[in-house]
């Protein structure tokens, strides 16, 4: 009789306490809103947004409802996070291998790179990247053209694009007036976020890769070499498959961090989710609602990433036990 | 050790050399070291202008803190650094040291705040630069720590309701970016509290950083707890200790010691994350830079040098701390 | 079992935190709070030349700053009893809602949306502004309609952002906004050449051009004014007494200019005056202050401290100042402008 009581009583008390705390906070919010006539609710999502968004995957303009703005922002988050994940993984593997290389100079260089980048806040790296892109490159009217029809300037990177709306033609970027029109454009804000995110995450991934490879038993590598495999072959056929099991779980964590870190893009004005939420928060005053939307979207992204990693993890682990 | 194809190795090294040489020539060989605007303008694009740091170092390091009172943040910063250094010295970890460290930190805050001992009061909105970065990250961690211990214990508790509450909190916080919590501190906190409790933005931000850090610290501490064999707790119970006594005196100290390197790494993370508070307009190191250079048309063109200087400060702190963390790892 | 100890701890911790962090202030009417506290918390910008800008010593100056000083002089008898709280465009509304500041004088545009849904009330218009564009001269642009395809730097969370979208949509011109968090970040990007044009209120453009540009002559403000931007102070909704005080201090300063009362001659006029209207304003013949909950010298002290509207304008944004703005709309109604203060009577 007494034991279940002892077990449940404190928990229920805690729950009551929590409910009380939340209730008190909620009461305060309502009180403030009533006193000052602040509007609340998610109905603003249906109102026209009224502000433009500089870039995005969807066709969007200011007359569209607010939820479209949020959607555009969320897609912009993915638009920078997914390529960054790809680049970071690629770079991370290269740097991680470099840290284990036999050549001492290469090893030291990679070590120095890791120690430098991971000890400087991402925000600062992002600002430096952005400053370098907008401060050091020429203006759009006399853009650099390292390759024909590839233009680099303060207005970003312009590449030829395939336009297949009518018949497939190549849409070339042209300097027109003071801007560049046509082609496939990547803004300096996007590029800064992409570069900074990739580099910052890459050094963490490099450490994970290094740890994973170091966990592969020495004998395995020696055996592969003794069989006459070439260095790349050893890596591809023996080391990577074995290391993968140790690498995948922390790698998934890094991907999660990368997606969350993309929220820093607000500092350089890349219109991702937080930036859009921040703007609409100011235009509508719905602070609570906007923050809730941001959190919900990130939580969903986190859950999806976690699920994907778990799925992959299960497959890798299975192969290991076979 | 891995043998890489020679071509790849050479490519790597050439790439590094191609990047490092111009940096070296710009940053050291052709750099201007004095606060000479004309010389800096002349050297633009060829050499760095470190003179901008000489010119603006007070604003960079202390933000808007009243100019003639800046010995106070300087002293506070030195105090905090001294505490951090002393904390790295393992033999000194006794209760007496903790008390002394706490006292030193309180003294640092008192120095910054003023209003006692004849010091003029300085409102928190004038605080800035390095001392603010240190106070926010240290304050956030210290506040987060007890909460993290509770969360870690709760997550491993046998009480289902408690456990799921802790899990929910940890996973929720770990799933969202810090910036959303900072926005909460800036925009939502004032609505959550009664009008009468007027909280400054600084404590609000510290609380939200603590709430964020607690979730991550909790996972680290949980890792430490998991490494303690169950026999320890049982043995303590057999000796007649209550569960909470056994946890407090037997399990936790060992778990924390096991988790120590990871805890130091978490602190490095919080230290770096504190740069985000510049987004809610607090002028810690990153924010102080725009304070120092943003409003000055002459020196504004040398932002890059300012960024690099601040990056170096962060780097020095983080590198030193992570070295300490590594030392603890191998000391075991 | 160990839930018990946890509960005990979890009980004490929030209480401890709360007691550590809470600094209880006096709740109640704003005026009483201000009097008890002995100063006014005035929300200003983080640094807009001419309106509110701190110097390197942390002394604030500007049009909005003077307005707050005038209110402090009227309410507390001392123009220095103001503490300025710098707010960015995102924080300003939550600061006034939460009571962090008593009055928001932060070149904020009065709009229906803000007036109706943000929990604040604008007390009136103190500066009639409009949105314009700043471009580098070397682009040889003479009209905003030539900005096709251009990138325009703008600050987020402002009415400017919405006006920009509206204007170019109505003109059928496609432009690309580049949105920045802060005022400083936005003009920094413009001066670095990231954008071909910069947009904000004309007064802000003048400040940015004359104060922040390395060489102001390289930039030109385009003739188009694309919006109405009535700027004015705002207070928390729900306190009519405080609302009236802020509103009438501004009116009194405008009326003082109408009567030709300046900082220099206010004492003489008060002593020699025969005009009953001036007597009412300066409190020499009638006590207009008691209607506001203030004493009879309120307007006198305000004028004595910061001067009349014309003086504040001239000192901070007028032709003699760094901004070099003409009076334009912000002249008195009988001098070609639209400033028309209701009578103090």
Image (cartoon, coloured by chain):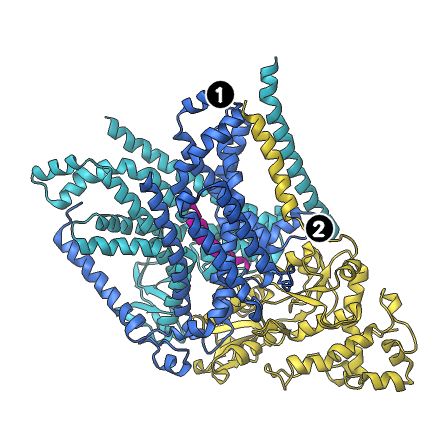
Disc 1 residue crowd, few under 14, some 14–19, many 20+, Cα 10 Å: some
Q: Secondary structure at mark 1?
A: helix
Question: Left of C40 or right of it: where is A80?
Answer: left
Of all residues shown, which one is farthest toward the top?
Answer: A1
Residue A280 falls in image quadrant: bottom right
Residue B322 on image: x %, y %? 36, 49
* Residue situated in front as seen by the camera: A233 or B162: B162
Q: Are marks 2 and 1 in contact (CB under 8 Å)?
A: no
Nearer the camera: disc 2 or disc 1: 1
Q: Is residue B316 above or below residue A260?
A: below
Q: CA distance from mark 2 to mark 1?
A: 45 Å
> Which residue is located at x 42 percent, y 24 percent?
B232
Q: Nearer the viewer, residue B322 or A183?
A: B322
Question: What shade does chain B have?
Answer: blue
Q: Which residues make up the magenta segment?
A: B266-281
- Chain name for mark 2: C
Residue A62 visible? The answer is: yes
Q: Vertical placement of A204 versus B25: above or below?
A: above
Instruction: Give the color of chain C as drawn.
Output: yellow
Where is the C terminus of chain B found, in terms of image quarters?
A: top left
Chain drawn cyan, letter?
A
Secondary structure character of the magenta stretch overall:
helix
Quadrant position of residue C340: bottom right
Circle 1 residue = B237
Q: Is residue C328 left or right of residue C297?
A: left
């Amino acid at each position: 009789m007494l034991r279940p009581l002892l077990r449940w009583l404190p928990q229920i008390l805690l729950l009551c306490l929590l409910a009380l705390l939340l209730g008190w906070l909620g009461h305060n919010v309502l009180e403030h809103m009533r006193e000052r006539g602040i509007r609340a609710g998610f109905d603003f999502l249906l109102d026209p947004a009224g502000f433009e968004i500089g870039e995005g995957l969807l066709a969007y303009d200011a007359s569209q409802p607010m939820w479209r703005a949020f959607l555009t922002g969320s897609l912009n988050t993915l638009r920078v996070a997914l390529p960054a994940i790809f680049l970071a993984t690629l770079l991370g593997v290269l740097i991680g291998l470099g840290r284990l290389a036999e050549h001492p100079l290469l090893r030291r260089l990679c070590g120095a790179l890791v120690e430098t980048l991971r000890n400087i806040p991402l925000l600062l790296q992002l600002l430096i990247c952005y400053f370098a892109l907008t401060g050091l490159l020429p203006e759009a009217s006399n853009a650099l053209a390292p390759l024909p029809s590839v233009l680099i300037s303060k207005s970003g990177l312009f590449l030829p694009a395939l336009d297949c709306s009518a018949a497939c033609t190549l849409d070339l970027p042209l300097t027109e007036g003071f801007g560049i029109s046509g082609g496939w454009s990547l803004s300096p804000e996007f590029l800064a976020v992409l570069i900074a995110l990739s580099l910052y995450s890459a050094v963490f991934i490099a450490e994970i890769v290094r740890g994973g490879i170091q966990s592969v038993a020495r004998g395995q590598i020696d055996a592969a070499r003794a069989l006459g495999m070439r260095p790349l072959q050893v890596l591809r056929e023996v080391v990577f498959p074995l290391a993968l099991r140790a690498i995948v779980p922390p790698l998934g964590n890094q991907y999660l961090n990368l997606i969350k870190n993309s929220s820093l893009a607000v500092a350089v004005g890349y219109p991702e989710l937080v930036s859009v939420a921040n703007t609409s928060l100011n235009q509508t005053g719905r602070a609570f609602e906007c923050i809730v939307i941001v959190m919900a979207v990130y939580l969903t992204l986190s859950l999806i990433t976690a699920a994907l990693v778990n799925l992959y993890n299960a497959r890798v682990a299975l192969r290991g036990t076979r | 050790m891995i043998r890489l194809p020679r071509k790849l190795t050479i490519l790597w090294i050439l790439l590094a050399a191609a990047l490092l040489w111009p940096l070296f020539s710009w940053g050291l060989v052709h750099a201007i070291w004095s606060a000479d605007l004309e010389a800096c303008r002349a050297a633009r694009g060829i050499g760095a202008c470190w003179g901008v740091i000489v010119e603006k170092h007070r604003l960079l390091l202390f933000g808007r803190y009243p100019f003639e009172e800046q010995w106070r943040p300087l002293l506070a910063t030195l105090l905090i650094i001294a505490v951090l250094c002393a904390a790295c010295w393992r033999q000194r970890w006794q209760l007496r040291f903790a008390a002394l460290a706490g006292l030193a930190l309180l003294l640092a805050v008192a120095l910054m705040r003023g209003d006692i001992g004849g010091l003029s009061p300085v409102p928190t909105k004038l605080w800035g630069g390095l001392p603010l970065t240190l106070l926010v990250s240290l304050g956030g961690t210290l506040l987060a720590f007890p909460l993290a211990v509770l969360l870690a214990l709760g997550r491993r508790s046998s009480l289902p309701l408690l456990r799921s509450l802790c899990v929910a909190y940890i996973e929720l916080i770990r799933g969202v970016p810090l910036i959303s919590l900072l926005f909460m501190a800036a925009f939502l906190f004032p609505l959550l509290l009664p009008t009468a409790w007027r909280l400054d933005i600084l404590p609000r931000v510290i609380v939200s950083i603590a709430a964020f850090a607690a979730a991550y610290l909790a996972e680290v501490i949980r890792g430490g707890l998991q490494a303690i064999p169950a026999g320890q707790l049982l043995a303590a119970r057999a000796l007649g200790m209550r569960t909470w006594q056994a946890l407090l005196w037997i399990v936790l100290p060992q778990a924390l010691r096991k988790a120590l390197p990871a805890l130091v790494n978490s602190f490095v993370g919080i230290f770096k994350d504190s740069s985000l508070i510049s987004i809610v307009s607090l002028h810690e190191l990153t924010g102080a830079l725009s304070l120092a250079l943003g409003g000055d048309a002459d020196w504004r063109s040398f932002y890059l040098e300012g960024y690099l200087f601040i990056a170096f400060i962060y780097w020095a702190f983080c590198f030193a701390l992570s070295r300490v963390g590594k030392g603890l790892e191998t000391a075991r | 079992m160990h839930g018990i100890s946890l509960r005990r701890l979890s009980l004490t911790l929030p209480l401890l935190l709360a007691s550590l962090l809470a600094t209880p202030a006096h709740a109640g009417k704003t005026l009483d709070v201000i009097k008890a506290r002995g100063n006014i918390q005035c929300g200003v910008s983080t640094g807009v030349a001419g309106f509110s800008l701190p110097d390197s010593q942390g002394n604030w100056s500007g049009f909005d700053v003077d307005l707050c000083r005038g209110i402090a002089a009227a309410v507390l008898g001392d123009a220095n009893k103001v503490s300025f709280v710098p707010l960015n465009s995102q924080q300003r509304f939550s600061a006034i809602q939460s009571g962090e500041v008593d009055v928001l004088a932060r070149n904020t545009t009065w709009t229906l949306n803000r007036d109706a849904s943000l929990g604040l009330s604008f007390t009136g218009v103190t500066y009639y502004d409009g949105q314009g564009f700043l471009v580098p001269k070397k682009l040889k642009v003479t009209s905003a309609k030539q900005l096709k395809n251009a990138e325009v730097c703008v600050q987020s969370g402002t009415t400017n952002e919405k006006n920009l979208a509206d204007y170019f949509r109505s003109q059928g011109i496609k432009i690309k906004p580049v949105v920045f968090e802060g005022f400083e970040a936005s003009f920094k990007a413009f001066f670095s050449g990231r954008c071909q044009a910069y947009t904000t209120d004309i007064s802000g453009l003048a400040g940015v051009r004359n104060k922040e540009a390395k060489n102001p002559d390289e930039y030109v403000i385009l003739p188009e004014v694309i919006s109405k931007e009535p700027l004015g102070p705002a207070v928390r909704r729900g306190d009519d007494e405080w609302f009236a005080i802020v509103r009438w201090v501004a009116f009194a300063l405008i009326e003082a200019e109408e009567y030709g009362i300046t900082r220099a001659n206010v004492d003489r006029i008060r002593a020699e005056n025969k005009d009953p209207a001036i007597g009412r304003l300066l409190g020499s013949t009638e006590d207009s202050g008691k209607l506001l909950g203030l004493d009879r010298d309120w307007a006198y002290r305000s004028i004595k401290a910061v001067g009349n509207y014309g003086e504040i304008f001239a000192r901070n944004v007028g032709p003699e100042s760094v901004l070099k703005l003409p009076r334009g709309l912000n002249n008195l109604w009988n001098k070609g402008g639209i400033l028309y203060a209701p009578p103090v009577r």
